[in-house]
Amino acid sequence: MPELDDIEYSRDECVKAVRDYFHFLFQMYLDESDFLYPPAAKDGDEGGWPSITADNLASVDKDETVIDLLRHLPFVRQRSSVGGSDTVKIAPFTTFANWEEAAANLANGREDAESVRVFTEGATLSEILPPHVVGLTSWTNSDVIVLDTDLGIVLWYECPGEIVAAGRPVRPVSDDPYDYEEDEEQAEWRGDSTAWSIPDFFKMLENQFRKLEFVPITKTKVWVTHPYFHAKDRDAVVPQVREIYRKHHWPDLAQYDKVSCQAEIKALLDSSFPNLVDHFEE
């Protein structure tokens, strides 16, 4: 296992890890239009999302390092399916938080700081996370996953053991938060989380897609082979969709035919599981 002392935070490394992961998801099942990228550096301007500023995020109590990271991260375009609350998923039942939208909403009063923190950090952690820790997911649709810029790690709060096991050979960080956290409350939530270095976290997720432990059914439904996540029709749908991915040569990206694969999955859903088909508003 990697040792915590050997890990350092790098904004550029973090941004690259997220970009690479999004590109991987594009190669497998998402579209380019599902991703949002910040303006590039130009004419002395370092680029980044103009809405993500210290002023706009002052009320959510994040430090300069977190704000600088968020300013340069890509996000996922969130389009809810018609008649439901499903959003584009980047892992099982996991929606990537859109901090660009949150910052804009805070600036114009459409959201308040408490709702943003609860939405991105969960009700339990939103009141206790320090300014150098930021939520990566939208809690109402997701497990709570946060990034610590001081330590350079991603922590999955109450991560199911099946996720950890299926992510091998990538392993979590070896650490005991009681060794470095004097605050009992801080040590407790960290102790209830599983941590990876930032690049390893996204590699761990990729591994599970490659092995089809994570199975994209549609853009808004990524399901798992193990039963800790329950979803209607899972046992019937997942084996059939896995076979379609394999038929189209997944995970060999040199041969994988994404267009044909996704079309065949859509045809299966249309004919046998119409309740699972995505219907997006344009």
Image (cartoon, rainbow, N blue to C red):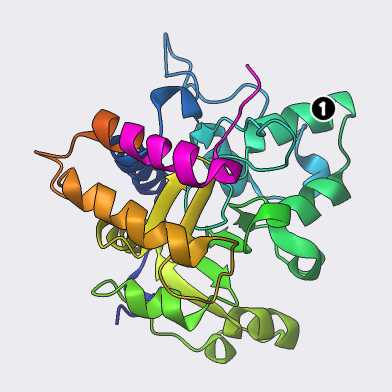
Q: Quadrant of the N terminus?
A: bottom left
- Count of marks, rendered view: 1
Instruction: Describe the element under mark 1 as helix, strand or loop.
Output: helix
Residue pointed to by mark 1: 107
Q: Position of residue 261 (x, y in %)?
A: 27, 37
In this rendering, the answer to whether 33 lies above or below 10 is above
In this rendering, the answer to whether 279 lies above or below 150 is above
Which residue is nearer to you in this view: 171 or 94? 94
Q: Position of residue 137 (x, y in %)?
A: 61, 52
Which residue is nearer to you in this view: 164 or 13? 164
Identify the residue at image location x=57%, y=56%.
Answer: 93
Which residue is nearer to you in this view: 109 or 91? 91
Identify the residue at image location x=88%, y=30%.
Answer: 110
Question: Is 221 on the left or on the right of 134, as rendered?
Answer: left
The part of the image, by quadrant, that contains residue 197 is: bottom left
Crowding around mark 1 (Cα neighbors within 10 Å: few <14, some 14 to 19, many 20+) is some
Q: Quadrant of the C terminus?
A: top right
Amino acid type assigned to the residue bearing label 1 in the image: Ala
